[in-house]
Amino acid sequence: MKRLSPETAPAGTPRRPFGPQAPVGIVHLGIGAFHRAHQAVYTQMVDGAGEWGICGATQRSATVVDQLRPQEGLYSVLERGPARTRLDVIGQIRDVVDGHTETERLIGRLADPAVRVVTLTITEKGYRTGPGGAVDRLTAGLRARSQRDAGPLTVLSCDNLNGNGEVLRDLLRENVSGDLADWVEHNVRYPCSMVDRIVPATTDADRAEAGQRLGAQDAGLVVAEPFRQWVIQDDFAAGRPAWEKAGAELVADVAPYERRKLRVLNGSHSLLAYLGALKGYRTIAQAASDDDLARAAWRLIEQDVAPTLAADGLEVLDYGRTVLERFTNPALPHLTTQVAMDGSLKLGPRLLGTIRDARAAGRMPQGAVIGVAAWMVYVEKACEEGVLPLNDPHAQALREAVARPADLVESLLGLDQVFGPDLRDDLDFRACLTERVAEVAGRPGQPGQPRQSIPRTA
């Protein structure tokens, strides 16, 4: 079977220039599956004139370069819903850069006056400065841009962080000085955004199905659920695509949407991932269809998260019901161990924020505490038994903590990379967490139990 390309693509596929000389208006750092299933899709839907082509840069692996260059940037999105599946070819990627070996070319793109927006999906662990990291490359691009006087730029984070634009702004401020700092202060904007779409890892079966539908082999295929959402702070330095025409919400303040998504969706996602993996479930859909686990996720949303979000003015419970229904989509084999990755970085925004707000209000958030307990037991089993994978930037510190003769809760609460002294010194929280760890570690049950009925509105 031939490879997907402009020649083999279905009729109607955008056919625009590709490669180092192709004009682009957006540079994206971290061109993984999520960006290709989310921001690139939104952009293609509104870029009729072709002024917002995307140059995607990889972080450390050349895999996406190898996937997309032979296909001249084309790839497809296999959208799997409970009732139907559809396939769309995306032609918005006009250039792909290996950020590790083609740094100068990436810097040149960032300094191009035609580029007016930089977007990022570099995951939580990408927001650390250091040689070869995304922030370091972005800083080098801004330096070249200032020297060239290439005009203002918007840097738009699309990662799951509280105040992601503000986090990025502060990192860049720490990374620049002198004339560059002054130029950046006057020419760069950092809107916050909230993104949502479930994008599981692509399987060989997915590729085979896409090949049959396309009549061509697509090495860059991504899989996604039908649902997608993008909430963006409307604060741009030099124009932007009309993303609102594709359904994005442009708002003055993203924070309420961001908190709701991180605490409801991402929080329950992590809880289901750890509890599900510990019970032997391979996918989130299997975990979310288990009676005990569905009950735990709903308790987290209804009893713990919702009270902490009351002042934000957004509806929470119906949103939570929708989230849990999305998780049960059997057409999306989203691995529990994939969602469990990088837990030491994810616990803070997903679960610990809920715990801190609840404790400040005098409540003990049992569901959120179970989520933290499940993470601790998952880490212990990954370190001691090796049955579960421990894919975490602080893996060595976690292994050292688990290896200590002290109690598991005591050892992991002592990690400053994860917990602060406020939670460590909260004796009631520590006692509750100790009870929940014992409960999770000894919980019986096998896969295959029926799913709890989640209450619905009329």
Image (tube, rainbow, N blue to C red):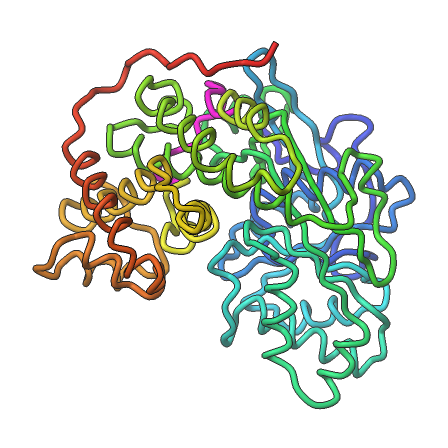
Tell me where residue 140 sits by quadrant.
bottom right
Q: Position of residue 82 (x, y in %)?
A: 54, 14
- Side (left or right) of 232 relative to 283: right
Q: Residue 265: tell me if it is visible.
A: no
* Vertical position of residue 8 compared to residue 178: above or below: above
Please name whichever residue, 172 or 116, is drawn nearer the observer in this view of the structure. Answer: 172
**Residue at the (27%, 43%) spot, across then down:** 373
Tell me where residue 116 sits by quadrant.
bottom right
**Residue at the (29%, 33%) spot, across then down:** 277
* Vertical position of residue 447 compared to residue 350: above or below: above
Farthest left residue?
405
Question: Tag count in the figure?
Answer: 0
Farthest bottom residue?
178
- Side (left or right) of 268 relative to 229: left
Q: Residue 346: tell me if it is visible.
A: yes
Q: Position of residue 119 (x, y in %)?
A: 69, 56
Please name whichever residue, 340 or 35, is drawn nearer the observer in this view of the structure. Answer: 340
Q: Position of residue 338 (x, y in %)?
A: 40, 40
**Residue at the (62%, 65%) spot, across then down:** 168
- Side (left or right) of 150 relative to 381: right
Q: Is residue 64 magenta?
A: no
Please name whichever residue, 379 or 72, is drawn nearer the observer in this view of the structure. Answer: 379
Quarter the N terminus occupies? top right
**Residue at the (26%, 58%) spot, across then down:** 413
Q: Is residue 331 magenta?
A: yes
Specify start and end residues of the magenta stretch as a single range.
326-338
Please name whichever residue, 49 or 39, is drawn nearer the observer in this view of the structure. Answer: 39
* Vertical position of residue 101 compared to residue 74: above or below: below
Q: Position of residue 372 (x, y in %)?
A: 32, 45
* Vertical position of residue 262 compared to residue 239: above or below: above
